[in-house]
Image (tube, rainbow, N blue to C red):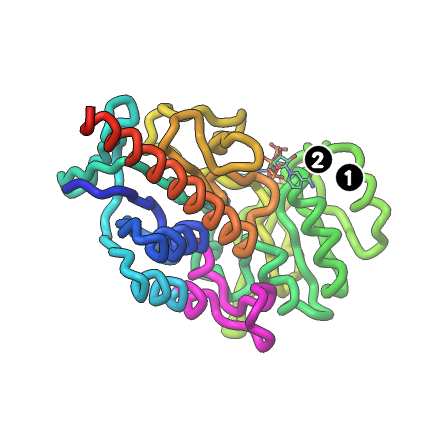
Amino acid sequence: MHHKAIIIGTGPAGLTAAIYLARANMSPLVIEGIQPGGQLTTTTEVDNFPGFPDGITGPELMDNMRKQALRFGAAIQSGRVKEVDFVHRPFTLFLEDGGQLTADAVIISTGATAKKLGITGESDNIGKGVSTCATCDGFFFRNKKIIVIGGGDTAMEEANFLTRFASEVRVVHRREELKASKIMQAHARGNTKVTWSLDRTPLEVMAGPLGVTGLKVRNNTTGQEEVLEADGIFLAIGHTPNTGFLGGQLPTDELGYLQVIPGTAQTAIPGVFACGDVQDRIYRQAITSAGSGCMAALDAERYLTEHASVEQELQVR
Ligand code: NDP
């Protein structure tokens, strides 16, 4: 089946792109993957999305965006894109169920997945004390003890940020040396509310009926195990942008994030656009994601309009 525009992904970027393209009469088809609504559906309260003075839950926010896209005529189809052909036009998307779709323009908004440790108690307590987003969930840990796991820039930034709420923030890192840039390390080391458990490998998230109680770690030098008390554990061990299905057809940076022409949502292939966390290694917020979704839709609309007029001209000749 052929569509003018297909959007892959239903996080804030994809759904914002859908709202804009639908309102521009481009009848977009949105492919909803295995996590409809994206990462926000795994958070509870969202207090920093403008327009909701009393906050809104992640699932509710995404449901609202979905309804808004549908109201203007976007079509949403569940399925997973497993492969693409961006070499030939129209572009072809191959779905996991064997189906195929073609499109004149494609917007990629497949997001990024926070890396997990894979230790006992981690996945069971996501949203109950284990979080992958300090900006989203830090507020809920006022005067509590928090552990941040990781030694990169994100861990340093999140540790600093979380000291605004927490009584103590402990950074747990698997090596003695931090990976973070010197300046970010200096900020965190200069913060008296940040304490350090370096050279420790996380082994298990400890939890009781009321949620997380601590983190069991192994001291890599002595081999001894200990439990560090905490009410919240923030994972800051990196993200993986969801680009596997592209088979390397679009250029990425060294971390795998899609590259766009700065100030636009245009990838290296005209007619293919990217927005949201799949192309953003720095901000990763719902609002920046939604903003880049709007950019992708406006860029795609312009591309489709120009493309249509070229085709019309060719037909007339
Ligand atoms: P990074 O990949 O840079 O760091 C991940 C950290 O997590 C590393 O210290 C790594 O340990 C640790 N880690 C990874 N896997 C595991 C595991 N299984 N168990 C225990 N620890 C683990 O990710 P970031 O999110 O910190 O940064 C991503 C990019 O974004 C970087 O380029 C960074 O510079 C940039 N960034 C920039 C910011 C800014 O400029 N304001 C803010 C935030 C990010 P090890 O060191 O041993 O590999």
Residue tagged 2:
180
Q: Residue at x 65, y 43 (%)?
A: 154
Alpha carbons under labels 1 and 2: distance apart? 6 Å
Q: Residue at x 25, y 56 (%)?
A: 75
In the image, 98 versus 228, the foreground residue is 98
User: Label 2 is placed on what type of residue?
Assistant: Ala
Where does the C terminus fall, quadrant-wise? top left
Left or right for 229, reference 163? left
Judge whether 274 appears above or below 122 on screen: above
> Label 1 is placed on what type of residue?
Gln
Ligand 1 occupies quarter: top right
Element at label 2: loop
Residue 151 occupies quadrant? top right
Mark 2 crowd level (few <14, some 14–19, many ≥20, 10 Å Cα): some
Residue 147, image x, y percentages: 66, 55
Please provide percent x and percent y for residue 314: 23, 25
Give the answer, above or below, for where 228 lies relative to 150: below
Which portion, as a residue range, is magenta?
Answer: 38-62
Query: Which mark, by number, is residue 185?
Result: 1
208 is higher (above) or lower (below) than 272: below
Is residue 219 among what the camera can see? no
- The answer to whether residue 304 is left or right of residue 156 is left
Label 2 beta carbon less than 8 Å to ligand 1: yes
Lateral position of residue 258 relative to residue 309, left or right: right
Give the SS element for disc 1.
helix
Where is residue 195? Give x, y as percent: 77, 51
Q: Going 76% across and 39% down the picture, which residue do you hit?
A: 184
Disc 1 or 2, which lies upstream in sequence? 2
> What is the x, y in percent for residue 200?
65, 42
Question: Picture quarter containing residue 55?
Answer: bottom right
260 versus 286 height, above or below: above
